[in-house]
Image: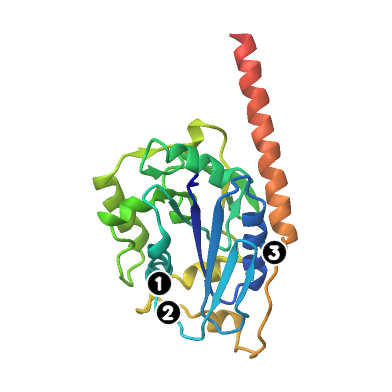
Amino acid sequence: MNHRFAYCLCPSYRKFTCLQTAMWLFQNQTYPYKRMYILEDSGLVEHTRIGDIIVISTEKRFRNLPLKYQYLIDILKPELEPDDAIIVWDDDDIYLEDFIERHMKVLEKFPVSAPSRSFIYYACALGYTGGFSGHGAMAFRAECLEKVPGWPITDIVEFDQLFVAELKKNFEFGDPCELGPPNFIYRWTLGVSGYHLSALGSGNVYRKLDEVLGPKNGIARKLKPVPDSAAIGLIEMAKVMIEEDRKAKERQYLSD
């Protein structure tokens, strides 16, 4: 029996704590048929494979994120089946345990799965947000690449919105929030905003991470799936908010 696979693409650069958390979150997913490809272009991590996690390390700095996505997609193409899923796994966001499983259920009926509601962590507060949450919150079938080959290879900030717009022109979207509460946390804080800025391209707005983190020290690190304390705290906060929402809806139902 062939199983529908979820292929998670994780581009990263010198974000070792965040990246190890991303690996840990991936390992904790309830969906069993999955694989994660990490592309780390600082040259400071070791090539490795840990279960379903493959780390590709290179010293060649990619100019922008679309090029990193395309590189990983090109690696996957020979083994992709049309109903397999492509998921961007952002290294600084938080994914609850059923994130992949819920997307895979939506992708049984729809080519693209995008949540109508997510969590956002900003200014030391966790809240809800609606609408577009970025590529890290969505998933799409591999067959979509036949019409929309991937993210546009551009240095402008809006590469993500351009890709989503092309998907919307060609495919119908489903909503995993119809199956349950939000399970994705968009993490935008002072601690990671410098990393987000590194994705803006190679033009005048580009801010190299070396300017944020200082010079490379030349030490190759062996990554392992380990959560940072901030991620654990955010997961606990999100689950408390989900439970509070459930109780509020229950009270509303009983009062009606």
Tell me the crowding category of disc 2: few under 14, some 14 to 19, or many 20 or more residues within 10 angstroms, Cα based.
Answer: some
Tell me the crowding category of disc 3: few under 14, some 14 to 19, or many 20 or more residues within 10 angstroms, Cα based.
Answer: some
**Residue at the location (64% across, 23% down)?**
248
Q: Is residue 194 above or below residue 28?
A: below
**Residue at the location (63% across, 91% down)?**
218
Q: Position of residue 81 (x, y in %)?
A: 39, 53
Q: Position of residue 12 (x, y in %)?
A: 53, 71
Badge 1 amino acid: Tyr
**Label 3: element kind:** loop
Q: Quadrant of residue 79?
A: bottom left
Q: Toward the viewer: 12 or 51?
A: 51
Q: Position of residue 143 (x, y in %)?
A: 33, 51
- Numbered label attached to residue 227: none
How far apart, in angstroms, are the residues tagged by discs 3 and 1? 23 Å
Badge 3 amino acid: Pro
Q: Where is mark 3, residue-wise? A: 225
Q: Where is mark 2, residue-wise? A: 62
| Residue 158 visible in the picture | no
Q: Position of residue 247 (x, y in %)?
A: 68, 24
| Farthest-out residue, front | 1
Q: Toward the viewer: 78 or 40?
A: 78
Q: Where is mark 1, residue-wise? A: 71
Q: Is residue 255 above or below residue 117?
A: above
**Label 2: element kind:** loop
**Cβ–Cβ below 8 Å for labels 1 and 2?**
yes
Of marks 1 and 2, the one in the foreground: 1
**Which image quarter holds the C terminus?**
top right
**Residue at the location (66% across, 17% down)?**
251
Among the two numbered marks 1 and 2 on one chain, the one whose residue lies closer to the N terminus? 2
Of marks 3 and 2, the one in the foreground: 3
